[in-house]
Every structure is written in structure tokens, then in C-alpha cells.
Image (cartoon, grey):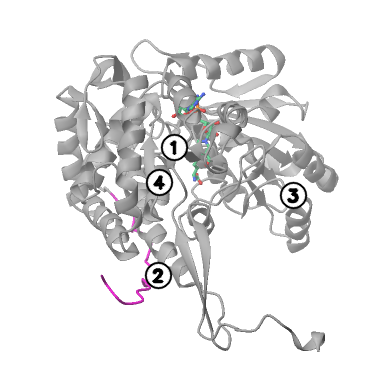
Amino acid sequence: MFNSIFVMERPKNEPILSYAPGSKEREELKEKLGELSSKEIEIPLIIGGKEIKTGNLGKCVMPHDHNHILAHYHMAGEKEIKMAIDAAIKAKEEWENYSYIDRISIFLKAAELLSTTWRSTLNAAAMLDLGKNVFQAEIDSACELIDFFRFNSYYATKIYTEQPQSSKGILNRMEYRALDGFIFAVPPFNFASISGNLPTAPAIMGNVVLWKPASSAVYTAYHIMKLLQEAGLPDGVINFIPGPGSKVGEIVFSDPNFGGVHFTGSVNTFNSMWESIGKNIRNYKSYPRIVGETGGKDFVIAHHTANRKALITALIRGAFEYQGQKCSAASRAYISKTVWEDIKDELIETTKNLKMGAPTDFSNFVNAVIDKAAFKKITGYIEYARENAKILVGGEYDDSVGYYIKPTIVLTDDPHFKTMEEEIFGPVLTLYIYDDDKYEEVLKLCDQTSPYGLTGSIFAQDREAIRKAEKILVHAAGNFYINDKPTGAVVDQQPFGGSRGSGTNDKAGSYLNLLRWTSARSIKENFNPPEDYTYPFMK
Ligand SMILES: NC(=O)c1ccc[n+]([C@@H]2O[C@H](COP(=O)([O-])OP(=O)(O)OC[C@H]3O[C@@H](n4cnc5c(N)ncnc54)[C@H](O)[C@@H]3O)[C@@H](O)[C@H]2O)c1
Ligand SMILES: N[C@@H](CCC=O)C(=O)O
């Protein structure tokens, strides 16, 4: 037993590599892209450390070339889900009795492997499977995932050192236990780092996990699972069970050992989870922890003092990076009239010239959206906007080879227009132009226009205008940016999450999230217990 109080030093965020022409990382990544795209692999379930094949197969294809199959993956059925629950419960006792140092050592090793020998593999997988350009992959499947492994380990050691006071003859201790049962980790398609964080954050705190990756991101998730196994993750601690969400969910939520869900995805899915859990509430051995981050309708507000160049850059990057497939994407903007007059030509021209194509061509800024369903949904909004508003640029799309949609800017004079209120999750930005003297009204309008509360930006050089925005928009964004785009939160710098319809705001990338995965026990030892029940007042 390792008898020592070990508190990690606060790590540093993983540096973002440049992938500039001639750089080592660029050559390595290009080679890995060629290697992965030249073969078609078979992805099994991984339950109790064993590879399980069900023969019920799904496909992993490239969004930018959807006839190109990267892998076939085996989907879990009822039998395999029960196997995974059994494997998790079997692994639980030993795993929760690991010292926290033994546990975090595995994830720190995973971070080390990912920052070196695994970097090009994970980034190439994210580029081919998720349709990310090299920069979007680097900040996600390399840097953010490395940061999650390192900072979550650091937060765990900080939490464990948080102890109660003792008193004369009394020794008090706090034990941070794992939760009862198993945790169900259910990530979205769009971030490899989220897919890796949802199972590992609970595991670091001693929990065992069933991990169901998004069906359009199994390939990337599989590579993360293999990385964790190479880092020494014991069998059964995390069980990898791809499969159709609703089917897997129905079985998992009905199990008495269900101990909690770590979810990120759409509001509809999260609401259906709450309903399933509520329906099963009397079956559970303990009240499950429900932690979920959901959608956003993220805003940019430009005051008339806004820096015009910075605003244009924030709109382009915030709205169109990763084709707008970020819960934090800038999708509605309120721009003062004088600012609009100054920026409109450059904004439209720059958007029109954004280079779009395969992520393997590093000169492309925009790539394809994830799948047919997303393509259909986004183009539906574009057609609605074409009929009922004005399309300033973009609006074209083609899914013959990849799911390509041109970056699109919509102009409306109705601040409650459909595309000003609903999450589109694609490369569509809607603008509303307001009179300069209506700034305060627009702040209130922005606050009341969306059921979400995830991210938002204010662009202004006037301190009063900034203070007013911070105050009026206090509940409109859990990640609030001043003179910066609303995307790109960094672990341990801008912990991520929002309230209202955007989730439980348990702040991924901070100690707050780790606290959700422990059930603390108070221990009191009395060195001098009383031997007479009477009290002085009774005399
Ligand atoms: N707030 C955040 O941090 C954040 C981050 C990324 C994505 N998102 C949100 O996620 C959404 C896009 O991701 P998506 O399309 O993968 O979301 P989604 O809700 O369609 O799927 C999310 C996950 O839930 C699973 N799932 C679906 N129905 C289920 C059910 N009934 N039971 C159990 N699991 C089920 C899916 O298979 C997937 O793994 C957007 O709304 C986006 O805003 C939010
Ligand atoms: N945390 C990411 C968004 C994750 C959701 O898609 C950001 O801040 O851009």
C-alpha cells in the first residue's frame, strides 16, 4: 500500500502543434492518414477486456467520401449489454480499492502515449471518421483529450486532500467513495475528447463504466479504447459497447445497478434519458447521478464600438470551424447598424472564399458534415431560410461524394426567426441588424430568444457596454466571452457547460465534474468515548 499523501502539481495545457509544411508532425500525420484510409478494420465490442463479435454490424464511413468504408463495427445486443454490466460489477471491488495514485497513473500514462506515439493515430482517426481538419483534430483528439486525462487526475488528488476538521479526542476523515453500481457514458459524435472524457472522468474516481460511443464516431472511440488498454486500464473497468442509443439505453436504464449517466448530446436525447430513469427509479439500488451537457444556440453581439476585424474573424471561426458542428458554434449574431455597414462586404466575401473539401487536403478550412441525417437537417433549414429570409452567401450543397454544405449566412429582420432560435448544428449563421441606440433592448432580446444557455460573445471596446452585457446576459451563457469567439473552451481555463436547456452544467474540465462521481463518507473515531449517559443539565 502506498502510504503517502500525493498531490499532483497543476499540469500545463498540452501545446498545440503547428503542422506547418516541413514539420515532423505534419509528415507523421500524412503517413498515418494514408495508412488508416488504406485499410478496412473490424471493430469488436470490448467487454471485460475481451473482444466480442455479435455479427450485427454497423459501418464507419468518411463524411468527405461516404462510399469509403473505414470499418465495420459489431453492435451490442441485450446479451452483450448484460455481459458488460456483469463485467463492470465484477471489476468494481478491485478497481475502487486501487489507490488513487494507481488509478491516475494509468490516465497519466494514456496522456503521455497520446502526446507522443498515439498522437498521429488519434488525429488521423478524427480527421477521417469525424471530418475534422488537422487543426480541429489537433485541438480535440490530441490536446483536449490529453488535458482531460491530466487535469482530471490532478483534480482527483485535490478533492481527496479536502478533509474535515477534527476536535479534541475526535479524529474526522472524509472518504471519497466510488458511486454504487456502474456509470453509463454516452458521448456525442463531434468531439473525440468528450467521447474519451465521459467514461474516464468517473473511472478516475473509482467507478466502473459502460461506454456507448455515438454511432457515427465509433472508429475514433475504438482507437481511444485501444489507447487506454495500452496504458494499462484493467479489464472490465471501462466496457466498450457500440450500438443504437435507444436500444442500449432501454436495457441499461432498467438495470438495478445503474448508478449514473455521463451524457453529452442533444436535448431530446437527454430528456428521454430523464424519462427512462424516472420510470425505473424504484428499481435502482441508489439514486443515480445524472450529468448531461446538451445543445446551444450560441450568440455574438456586436456593440457599435466593436473591433471590426476581430468581429469578422470571430464570426468566421465561431460559425464555420468544424462546419458549425460544435455545441458552442456562433449561430446567431446581433450586429449594430454602423458595424454592419463597415463589415458586410468583407464578411460576405471572406465567407464566399472559404476553401471547402477533404480534410486530407490541409488547405481546406471547411470539410463535410458528419452524415446523411445531419446533411438533410441542415439543408432543410437552408431551404426554409431561402423561402422566408435572405441568404447573403452560401446556400449551396452537394452530397454526391461527401456531405458538403457551403458556409451560409442568413439575414433576417425578425429576431425570432426560426434560424435565430433553433439549433442547426451546421455551417449556418443568421444575422439580425439593430439600431445602435437599441443595444440594451437587444441584450434582453438575446437573453429571451433561446431555451439554451451555453456560450455567447460580446464585442465592444466600451467598458460600460461590456458590464451591461455581462449583467443582462448572466444566465444566457455558461461560457461567456468578451471580444472573443464563443468556441474553443480550454480544459482548466474555461471549464465548459451551460444551464437552462444546455444541461446540468457540471463543468467538464474542472474539479466540479469530478465531484459528481464520488459519494463521500464521513468517518469519526472517538479516542475517549463517554461512559456515562447523563448530562450536567440533569443534575
Ligand atoms: N454541451 C456540450 O458540451 C455539447 C458538446 C457536444 C455536443 N453537444 C450537443 O450534442 C448534439 C450533437 O451530438 P449528437 O448528434 O451525437 O447527439 P445525440 O443526442 O443524437 O446523440 C448523443 C449520444 O446519445 C446516444 N443516444 C441517442 N438516443 C439515445 C437513447 N434514447 N438512449 C441512450 N443513448 C442515446 C447517441 O447514440 C449518442 O451516443 C448537439 O445538440 C450538440 O449541441 C453538446
Ligand atoms: N467545448 C467545445 C464545444 C464542445 C461542443 O461541441 C468548445 O468550447 O468549442
- For disc 2, the neighbor class at 10 Å (few under 14, some 14 to 19, many from 20) is few
Query: x, y (%) of residue 62?
Result: 30, 22
Inspect the image, locate mark 1, and give the three-letter code of the amino acid beneath it: Phe
Inspect the image, locate mark 3, and give the three-letter code of the amino acid beneath it: Leu
Say which residue label 1 marks: 184
Q: Is residue 16 magenta?
A: yes
Query: x, y (%) of residue 137?
Result: 34, 41
The image shows residue 535, relative to residue 442, as above or below, that is: below
Which mark is on residue 197? 4
Asked which secondary structure carries label 4, the reply is helix
Asked which secondary structure carries label 1, the reply is strand
- Identified at 83% across, 48% down, the residue is 440
For the residues carrying marks 3 and 1, which lies nearer the camera in this image? 1
Inspect the image, locate mark 2, and give the three-letter code of the amino acid beneath it: Arg
Q: Nearer the viewer, residue 40 or 177?
A: 177
Which mark is on residue 412? none
Q: Is residue 108 left or right of residue 168?
A: left
